[in-house]
Amino acid sequence: MEPSAIAAEHAARLTALDPLLPPPPPLADVGVRLTAESGEAVAWFQETAPGMASRTWEPARRHNLEVRLAGEDRAATLGDLLDQWAARIMNAVTPGDLDAAAVVELPSRDTAAVSALVHRGFVPVSVVAVRKAGRVGPSGSDVRIRRAEPSDLDVATALNMTVVHYDAPFGKVTPREDTEEGLRNQLSFLLGQDEPAVWLAERDGRVVGIVHIQLPPVSNWTGRYVAAPSPAYLACLGVAEDERGGGVGAALAAHAHGVIDAAGLPVTLLHHALANPRSTPFWYSLGYRPLWTMWLRRPVVR
Ligand SMILES: CC(C)(COP(=O)(O)OP(=O)(O)OC[C@H]1O[C@@H](n2cnc3c(N)ncnc32)[C@H](O)[C@@H]1OP(=O)(O)O)[C@@H](O)C(=O)NCCC(=O)NCCS
């Protein structure tokens, strides 16, 4: 098939599958172009230098593949592209390098080809989930929700770190030596801003939870994931270990969603680890659903 016909069929399928997916852009002119009978892909490598904040949220070395699929047997087409890609990157990776991953991000509802990933040892690790404005979840317990102040920096940082450590075993988030310092610097900046973005839950004077949201223009980076103008982004929600399961998270999320809905923003996005037994059911009971699924093989070679 001609690349333009593959791209057109791919785009039409995604539009029919999920109205919240943006039109797929042309494959970027980076890295290496791979072609199959009814598919096309671009493969590129990305290394995040020590000290960069994004290193906490990603493996340090990412081998990425972006695909466009057409035809009836899309699992076979994706398998062909994955095998071509593997042949290219195998010699470039160190076996057992746990900080290197092969990464394929697919629209969550485009499921027909995913067996090709399963059969090659990829795991669905992380999801970008979306909530439409107005979706109402449980209101949560009657904790006090208040804006975080600069004097809350220590407890806000500590709660944010508990989220990083809880998420780390699931394969994408990677605590680094400087993660705490990076989060502290980010929170220090946020707590000094005029516009509130971080709120705390307090029970009997003790801080027991945190939520941090991004509104446009800060959240504009999420625009590539969704066919909706001005998405909001829920950057962090964490509850003290001994308070989980008692409605604190629901109360913080209800507050954050109230702020986002009042601002007239049509959707909220967030990332969560798919295997996280607390966050996954929690977000879906609050009206989120999967939009993009990130499949990882980490290490690339054992
Ligand atoms: C995920 C997380 C933020 C959810 O917060 P939480 O306070 O534990 O969640 P809630 O208590 O509000 O909701 C969970 C349960 O409490 C129940 N609940 C809700 N309101 C309640 C109330 N008023 N009283 C009692 N229980 C309540 C919910 O129905 C739900 O029940 P279930 O466990 O039977 O499904 C929290 O567990 C956490 O910090 N986990 C570790 C870090 C993490 O995963 N962060 C998210 C990263 S994306």
Image (tube, grey):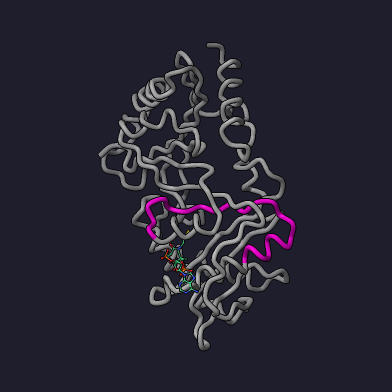
Residue 194 in the image: state x and y as whole percent: 73, 71
List the single residue furthest toward the top.
1
Q: Nearer the viewer, residue 146 or 290?
A: 290
Residue at position x 44%, y 48% in the image: 126
List the single residue furthest toward the bottom.
204
Residue at position x 47%, y 49% in the image: 49
Is residue 276 magenta-colored? yes
Quadrant location, the C terminus: top left
Q: Nearer the viewer, residue 220 or 143?
A: 143
Residue 292 in the image: state x and y as whole percent: 51, 42
Residue at position x 58%, y 20% in the image: 9
Residue range (magenta): 256-277
Residue 101 visible (yes or no): yes
Residue at position x 53%, y 71% in the image: 140
Residue 214 in the image: state x and y as whole percent: 64, 59
Is residue 89 magenta-colored? no
The quarter of the displayed image where residue 244 is located: bottom left
Query: With 233 as the anchor, is 247 left or right in this view?
Result: left
Residue 29 visible (yes or no): no
Q: Quadrant of ligand 1?
A: bottom left
